[in-house]
């Protein structure tokens, strides 16, 4: 039960080397309201020498890391804990990924149960809703987290989220806030989607063309900053402005769509995934078949976060093309 | 394909229209990289750590082993640059040597043909809609010779729920209701038809329905649309309506579970009953085969006078004469003398009774239209 220290807030960030973690550190470094930031990761992030960010090596896959973490929280008087140690793309080392995401979250929550911070912010994705034929066009935060039948990448995150939901119920004193980010695109971020869209060709499920949604990396980082600052609790979808059909996304990106029947695509991806030639597992194909689009209204209402960039500008920015007429997007839609 | 004198809002996108979008980019196009170049000069001030760092080098398979576990910033920077080179599938050197840039730009503008770079929240694409306009116009005025009446009952603005009967193995009826309002109503409003799952997830047809304005039939979607003051068309018979046999033609099936009534009560939208006559003759279903149909993801294989026999051409509708009648709006807040608020949506008995009343009303409208036709079968085609 640590209170805000007299000089300013103390924030601890796990996954400090992830894109969002690094961005958050940079933004907290510049903000005078925070007196001290603990960057927890297995590798040191780039730090300004003499700044207030301090790197502490912490491996969430170690069996006794929770005790270590609890000591840390108590010693530094951490009042805001940001849990962002999640993988941005699937890995073949799925056992290790499970240890890091699911069990790692357990360790984090164990520590936060022992030494309650004032606020706990968790980084999640909208993939936890799963791509399902019965999904409405806009998933709201209390929709069921369906995950994916056979994607450990998604299901580990679902399990981690469920643990956090349980924690929030058991610890009403802690403000628990979960941010579900739509796939993040941008010139510097690297994740499953940026890799997928960096290839010159992309598979298309023949005759299917679901709507897709992205959030720009700077919007995403801003949302995380907002979540650390605010007092809002609960889950929030962090999504960009607008949606586009998958094939239009490919056309804007200039990728060559390769339409193939479902069973061909599934077998092919299975082989390519097993031989480690592609970074997206077969289960990812469902996201090319069905909708998984979330509604960001709650974040606008309660978190005060509204995305600045439309999906088209996000895509152009990802490509490295400077947008010149982003403002006319809406006008063109109505024309 | 389309008339040249069309107003710009629904004309076929012209070449120069595309050019306006990409043309603006022209002055600085030579600078635009073909694939995201992650090795460019932005590294100077803003140093980011990409998601790469999350994968542990000893387990992550293809990960480049970290040369300096802690400390040496220079080496880590070098490592990070190497990492970023791996992300694009095309080696950057190869890209520089091959003249792919021009090809890529040409491909991009080609790929954007007939689609717009902005769609509405539910996936309606204005250019794709314009692209299919001629087909609907042909079906509407030449093929089915639709006679629409009662269009004045549709409000020029504000929400309303069109409730219609359903027939035929392909949703021509929803397309014709949509087109009738867009073409003949003074406000030329867009109708958003709710499409059953079976059609919405059909390959090719589903995405086309979505691009021209169809929305998957889902209570949340419908409520969102109505709250945006859109005009929503529902076919409460759903799949059962489409699967009606010829002998049951124009006999309305059960109206689902009254979901549309709940929707109208919750959103305060008036219900406009719509009767469509002619759709049954356009694709008279003589029988349906359920064997094997489930394997290919459809509920049944229809047997029509033309369908399996003529192959895919058999899916084309017969040229029956159509009548579409829009009835007077029913404002549920004034039904039965007392105000029905959103709370009434929880009263299942009331909802079911209202649903049945509306069903009866549409049945009466259909019977009236059928009575106008002179004899049962042939005039269905001659009108």
Image (cartoon, coloured by chain):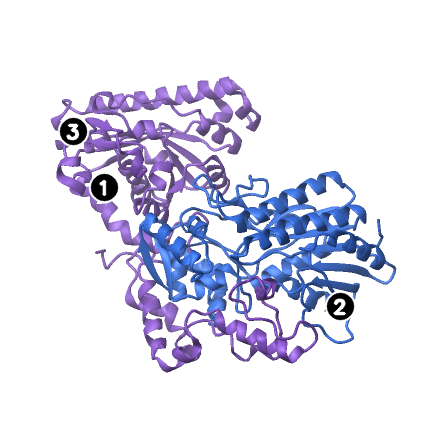
| Above or below, comparing residue B146 to residue A131 in the picture | above
Question: Chain under label 2?
Answer: A
Which picture quadrant has residue B32? Answer: bottom left
Residue at 35% from the left image edge and 80% from the top image edge: B98
Residue underneath mark 3? B380
**Pointer 1 residue:** B140
Q: Is residue A98 visible?
A: yes
Task: Give the alpha-carbon distance from disc 2 to disc 3, as whole Å.
Answer: 79 Å
In the figure, the shade used to draw chain B is: purple
Whole-Å distance between the Cαs marked 2 and 1? 68 Å
The chain that hosts pointer 3 is: B
Q: Position of residue A230 (x, y in %)?
A: 72, 53
- Horizontal arrangement in the rendering, residue B316 relative to residue B97 (left or right): left
Element at badge 3?
A: helix
Tell me if mark 3 has few (under 14), some (14-19) or many (20+) residues whose alpha carbon lies within 10 angstroms of its own: many
Q: Colour of chain A?
A: blue
The quarter in which the C terminus of chain A is drawn is bottom left
- Give the percent coordinates (x, y) of residue B86: 49, 71
Is disc 1 on the same chain as disc 2? no
**For the residues marked 3 and 1, what is the alpha-carbon distance in whole angstroms?**
15 Å
Q: Secondary structure at mark 2?
A: strand
Q: Residues within 10 Å of mark 2 (few under 14, many from 20)?
A: many
Badge nearest the viewer, 2 or 1: 2
Q: Which label was assigned to residue A53?
A: 2
């Amino acid at each position: 039960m640590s209170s805000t220290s007299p000089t300013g807030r103390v924030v601890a960030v796990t996954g400090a080397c992830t894109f969002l973690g690094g961005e958050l550190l940079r933004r907290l470094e510049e903000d005078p309201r925070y007196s001290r930031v603990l960057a927890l990761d297995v590798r040191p992030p780039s730090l300004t020498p003499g700044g207030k960010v301090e790197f502490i090596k912490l491996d969430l896959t170690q069996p006794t890391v929770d005790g270590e973490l609890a000591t840390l929280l108590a010693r530094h008087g951490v009042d805001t804990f940001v849990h962002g140690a999640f993988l941005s793309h699937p890995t073949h080392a799925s056992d290790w990924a499970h240890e890091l995401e699911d069990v790692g979250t357990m360790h984090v929550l164990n520590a936060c149960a022992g030494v309650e911070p004032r606020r706990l912010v968790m980084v999640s994705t909208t993939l936890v809703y799963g791509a399902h034929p019965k999904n409405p066009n806009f998933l709201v935060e209390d929709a069921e987290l369906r995950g994916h039948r056979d994607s450990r990448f998604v299901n580990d995150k679902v399990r981690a989220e469920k643990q956090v939901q349980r924690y929030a119920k058991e610890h009403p004193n802690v403000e628990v806030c979960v941010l579900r980010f739509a796939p993040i695109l941008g010139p510097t971020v690297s994740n499953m989607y940026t890799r997928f869209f960096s290839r010159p060709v992309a598979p298309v499920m023949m005759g299917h063309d679901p709507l897709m949604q992205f959030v720009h990396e700077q919007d995403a980082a801003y949302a995380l900053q907002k979540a650390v600052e605010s007092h809002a609790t609960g889950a929030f979808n962090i999504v960009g402005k607008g949606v586009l059909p998958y094939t239009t996304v490919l056309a804007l990106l200039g990728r060559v769509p390769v339409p193939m029947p479902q069973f061909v695509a599934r077998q092919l991806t299975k082989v390519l995934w097993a031989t480690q030639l592609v970074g997206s597992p077969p289960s990812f194909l469902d996201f090319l078949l069905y909708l998984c689009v979330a509604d960001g209204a709650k974040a606008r209402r309660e978190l005060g976060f509204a995305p600045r960039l439309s999906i088209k500008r996000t895509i152009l920015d990802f490509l490295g093309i400077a947008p010149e007429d982003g403002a006319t997007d809406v006008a063109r839609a109505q024309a | 394909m389309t008339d040249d004198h069309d107003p710009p809002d629904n004309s076929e996108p012209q070449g120069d229209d595309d050019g306006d979008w990409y043309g603006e980019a022209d002055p600085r196009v030579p600078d635009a990289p073909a694939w995201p170049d992650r090795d460019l000069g932005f590294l100077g001030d803003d140093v980011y750590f990409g998601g790469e760092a999350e994968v542990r080098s000893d387990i992550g398979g293809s990960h480049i082993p970290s040369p300096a576990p802690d400390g040496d910033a220079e080496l880590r920077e070098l490592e990070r640059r190497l990492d970023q080179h791996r992300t694009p599938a095309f080696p950057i050197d190869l890209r520089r040597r091959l003249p792919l840039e021009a090809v890529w730009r040409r491909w991009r503008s080609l790929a954007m043909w007939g689609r717009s770079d902005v769609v509405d929240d539910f996936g309606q694409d204005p250019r794709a809609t314009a692209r299919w306009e001629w087909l609907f116009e042909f079906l509407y005025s030449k093929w089915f010779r639709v006679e629409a009446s009662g269009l004045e009952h549709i409000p020029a603005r504000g929400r309303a729920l069109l409730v219609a009967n359903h027939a035929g193995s392909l949703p021509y009826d929803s397309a014709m209701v949509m087109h009738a309002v867009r073409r003949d109503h003074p406000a030329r409003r867009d109708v958003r038809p709710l499409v059953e799952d079976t059609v919405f997830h059909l390959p090719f047809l589903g995405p086309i329905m979505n691009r021209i304005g169809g929305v998957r039939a889902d209570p949340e979607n419908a409520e969102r649309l109505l709250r945006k003051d859109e005009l929503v068309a529902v076919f409460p018979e759903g799949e059962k309506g489409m699967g009606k046999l010829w002998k049951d033609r124009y006999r309305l099936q059960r109206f689902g579970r009254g979901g549309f009534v709940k929707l109208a009560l919750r959103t305060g939208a008036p219900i406009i009953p719509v009767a469509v006559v002619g759709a049954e003759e356009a694709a008279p279903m003589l029988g349906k085969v359920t064997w094997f149909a489930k394997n290919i993801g459809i509920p049944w294989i229809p047997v029509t006078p033309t369908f399996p026999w003529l192959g895919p051409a058999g899916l084309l509708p017969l040229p029956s004469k159509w009548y579409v009648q829009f009835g007077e709006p029913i404002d549920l807040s004034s039904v039965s003398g007392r105000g029905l608020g959103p709370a009434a949506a929880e009263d299942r008995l009331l909802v079911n009774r209202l649903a049945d009343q509306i069903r009866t009303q549409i049945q009466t409208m259909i019977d009236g239209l059928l009575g106008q036709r002179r004899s049962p079968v042939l005039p269905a085609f001659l009108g």
